[in-house]
Image (spheres, rainbow, N blue to C red):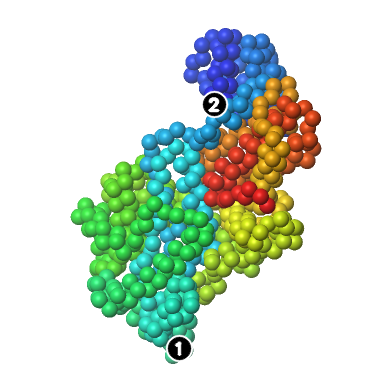
């Protein structure tokens, strides 16, 4: 049953019985705020024109009619113009039976909408870092949530595999690498290439310093430093498909892809399709030419192509450099066109940090001016940066928090803290290792995803593994605790079962209400592209169950029917925790 729809229909019938058919008025019904008694609240102010009575009298009249004619409504209270309705324990017992019997609970019917979501989008000149972790976890989780509300979701990665930044790593390896390879160095390929990106910056800064010391301005020195000029020439040679440069590019990118695959597997994220900038930028150039032919773009004296968006409150935007090489906007135009044409998309979501807000504003506007109406179905899921207690990260200076190192540290810390608390005492070494990895990654994912995507966040690894409080391990431990109770019941031959509404305690009714709210939570998370909504729900459910477990016996309950009901309730709480955490990309252990 859709509870919101049921309540709306019931209230509509009472209002129409009292005041006649509803016209244009929209009933305003919402969940009752926690500080008041009740489950649903009707705002009666829009109905006063019909009732011709005070807000309090109108609310009381509707409440009396509902309780007289709807056995599901057990009581009501009025606070000014707000009618708070409380539903009967029998109503919630019926809902619980529906939840337990519904094998697809929380999974909405198919909508037929094709939604593509792009996340990760790494550069092939450095390994993934903490910022990439937030991007990957956010994108993967939103994809899971959108699938849960019935959309057909296509998860894609766009690899930024070309450009001046890639040439910097290539040039540094060519000049200073001495033929070093992942095999000869023992380094993951993405780490090795990232090492030479840092090496380029070190030598480049030295050249700039030398030129400024000779009297050149810093701005001019940055442009005329030999390394930078050589990197720019290498990019031109790459776009001309120079065999030597292209071969070097393919070799070093291959190293990086092998490294990325290891990190993605460790994070538990994947993609349905991978796009490469090197395969889309030429299509982008064709679109730029189309814009020139239409008179939307213009060419400057140096040969560069621009669009003037000042009339739209923006500025002038470069679309193609004077030497004919492309910029990010060039390939983004081509990629967007290809995706909508090839996949019959209804929506395209880009998971990209908030430093690119302006870029996507321009992208949508340029596509709109080119006549692509599907540009209105592009969404930039903008998220805040991840900061550390000791400040921001900088790839060029090698001060990033490496994703692989962070994952290993999280697993190691989870093992240490679990050992200290005795949570692995009954485990074999293999079980302890598996649980430590599950807890470490769960801590990392939950700590990042519980924060609203739009907010900048401070990441504290040790705080994230606390087994108490709003953390992944706390929720995982709650699930493991429930599974332990259920195993003991099974071993003792005690079956789960239903009970009459009279057997329910207020705390049990409260848990059923929380379970029944899960589909609404998933829907809200999908509408807002916010896994944080699911994370908050999972924590509240786990916290609520822990309080209940602390105060009420389950296996030692003497009344067999009540004991069976409590086992069934525990079973469904564990199930919904598992479903919610799965939407966050988090595994939950059976034992811990």
Q: Secondary structure at mark 2?
A: loop
Q: How many marks?
A: 2
The tag earlier along the polypeptide, 1 or 2, is 2
- 220 versus 554 height, above or below: below
Looking at the picture, does residue 322 appear above or below residue 74?
A: below
**Residue placed under numbered mark 1 in the picture:** 210
Q: Residue at x 63, y 10 (%)?
A: 69
Q: Quadrant of residue 258?
A: bottom left
Helix, strand or loop under label 1: helix
CA distance for labels 1 and 2: 72 Å
Q: What x and y, as percent, mark residue 340?
A: 31, 47
Indicate whether 569 appears above or below 85. below
Tell me: 295 left or right of 31. Answer: left
Q: Quadrant of residue 271?
A: bottom left
Give percent across and percent down for residue 129: 52, 65
Label 2: how many residues lie within 10 Å, few (<14), some (14-19) or many (20+)?
Answer: few
Looking at this view, is 341 or 457 the one in front?
341
Q: Is residue 225 left or right of residue 559?
A: left
**Tag shown at residue 2:** 2
Q: Nearer the viewer, mark 1 or mark 2?
A: 2
* Residue lying at 41% horizontally and 34% vertically, measured from the top left: 111
Q: Nearer the viewer, residue 590 or 527?
A: 590
Q: Nearer the viewer, residue 547 or 388?
A: 547
The image shows residue 20 at horizontal and vertical percentages of 54, 9
- Can residue 126 be seen at all in this image of the molecule? no
Q: Quick check: 202 left or right of 442?
A: left
């Amino acid at each position: 049953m859709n509870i919101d729809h049921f309540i709306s229909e019931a209230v509509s019938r009472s209002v129409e019985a009292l005041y006649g058919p509803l016209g244009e008025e929209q009933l305003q019904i919402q969940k009752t705020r926690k500080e008041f008694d009740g489950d649903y609240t009707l705002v009666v102010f829009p109905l006063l024109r019909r009732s011709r009575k005070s807000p309090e009298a109108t609310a009381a009249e509707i409440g009396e009619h509902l309780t007289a004619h709807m056995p599901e409504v057990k009581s009501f209270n009025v606070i000014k113009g707000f009618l708070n309705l409380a539903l009967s324990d029998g109503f919630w017992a019926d809902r619980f039976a529906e939840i337990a019997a519904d094998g697809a609970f929380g999974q909405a019917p198919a909508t037929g909408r094709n939604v593509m979501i792009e996340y990760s989008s790494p550069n092939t000149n450095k390994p993934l870092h903490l910022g990439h972790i937030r991007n990957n976890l956010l994108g993967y989780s939103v994809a899971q949530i959108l699938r849960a509300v019935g959309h057909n979701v296509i998860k894609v990665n766009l690899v930024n595999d070309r450009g001046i930044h890639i040439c910097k790593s290539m040039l540094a390896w060519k000049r200073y690498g001495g033929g070093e390879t992942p095999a000869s160095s023992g380094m993951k390929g993405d780490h090795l290439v990232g090492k030479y990106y840092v090496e380029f910056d070190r030598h480049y800064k030295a050249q700039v310093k030398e030129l400024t010391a000779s009297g050149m301005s810093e701005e001019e020195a940055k442009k005329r430093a030999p390394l930078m000029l050589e990197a720019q020439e290498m990019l031109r040679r790459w776009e001309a498909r120079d065999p030597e440069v292209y071969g070097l590019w393919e070799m070093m990118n291959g190293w990086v892809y092998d490294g990325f695959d290891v990190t993605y597997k460790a994070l538990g994220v994947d993609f349905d399709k991978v796009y490469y900038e090197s395969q889309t930028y030429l299509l982008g150039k064709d679109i730029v030419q189309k814009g020139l032919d239409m008179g939307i773009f213009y060419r400057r004296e140096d040969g560069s192509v621009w669009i003037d968006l000042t009339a739209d409150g923006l500025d002038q935007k470069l679309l193609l450099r004077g030497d004919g090489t492309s910029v990010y906007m060039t390939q983004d135009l081509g990629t967007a066109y290809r995706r909508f044409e090839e996949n019959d998309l209804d929506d395209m979501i880009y998971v990209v940090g908030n430093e690119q807000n302006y870029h996507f504003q321009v992208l949508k506007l340029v596509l709109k001016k080119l006549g692509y109406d599907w540009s209105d179905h592009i969404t930039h899921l903008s998220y805040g940066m991840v900061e550390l207690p000791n400040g921001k990260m900088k790839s060029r200076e090698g001060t990033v928090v490496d994703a692989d190192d962070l994952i290993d540290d999280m697993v190691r810390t989870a093992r240490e803290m679990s050992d200290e608390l005795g949570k692995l005492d009954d485990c074999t070494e293999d079980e302890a290792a598996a649980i430590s990895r599950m807890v470490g990654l769960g801590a990392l994912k939950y700590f990042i995803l519980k924060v609203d995507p739009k907010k900048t966040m401070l990441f504290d690894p040790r705080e994230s593994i606390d087994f108490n409080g709003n953390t992944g391990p706390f929720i995982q431990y709650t699930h493991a605790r429930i599974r332990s109770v259920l195993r003991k019941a099974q071993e003792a031959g005690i079956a789960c079962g239903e009970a009459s509404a009279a057997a329910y305690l207020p705390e049990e009714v409260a848990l059923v209400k929380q379970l029944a709210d899960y589909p609404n939570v998933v829907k809200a998370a999908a509408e807002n592209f916010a896994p944080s909504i699911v994370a908050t729900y999972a924590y509240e459910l786990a916290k609520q169950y822990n309080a209940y477990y602390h105060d009420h016996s389950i296996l030692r309950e003497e009344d067999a029917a009540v004991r069976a009901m409590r086992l069934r309730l525990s079973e469904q709480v564990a199930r919904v925790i598992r479903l919610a955490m799965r939407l966050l990309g988090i595994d939950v252990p059976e034992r811990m």
